Amino acid sequence: MNYLVVGVLIASVIIWIGAWWGHYSTKLLMSHYGYDFEAMNKTDSYGNVLLENLERVNKLKSNYLGVGWPFKAIVGLVMYSPYLLLVYFGGSLIRRMKIKNKEHAPNNGYKQ
């Protein structure tokens, strides 16, 4: 059971970091392309964006303003938890079967 708890904790930390990094890297890319987050209107926001980067910034903006990263992390953890439980209980079942097979295996010492 300790492995399951440690696995859930490690997975949740990795998922939270991944979700946060996805949000942060989008913001970082947008500012790199010249998007101004402090601007009051759309014209000022796109003032420093080059024309060749405009489509890319629009795609990044729709990603940035979509579902927030905490919700993405929660959904990711909910989607990953059944897999983690399946692997844990599957591994436990395989270990039990191996132990049971060793108990019932014929003796190879050739004592009769």
Image (spheres, rainbow, N blue to C red):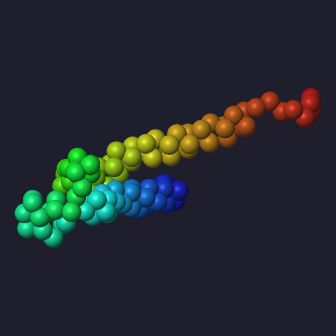
Q: Residue at x 9, y 59 (%)?
A: 42
User: In the image, is 78 to the left or to the right of 35?
Assistant: right
Using the rendered view, name the quadrant where residue 33 is placed: bottom left
In the image, is residue 89 above or below residue 5?
Answer: above
Q: Residue at x 34, y 45 (%)?
A: 79
Q: Residue at x 43, y 58 (%)?
A: 14
Q: Position of residue 16 (x, y in %)?
A: 36, 60
Q: Position of residue 5 (x, y in %)?
A: 46, 59
Q: Residue at x 80, y 30 (%)?
A: 106
Q: Position of residue 1 (x, y in %)?
A: 50, 56
User: Nearest the camera: 21 or 90?
Assistant: 21
Q: Quadrant of the C terminus?
A: top right
In the image, is residue 103 above or below residue 25?
Answer: above
Q: Position of residue 111 (x, y in %)?
A: 92, 32
User: In the image, is 28 to the left or to the right of 87?
Assistant: left
User: In the image, is 36 to the left or to the right of 76?
Assistant: left
User: In the image, is 32 to the left or to the right of 8?
Assistant: left
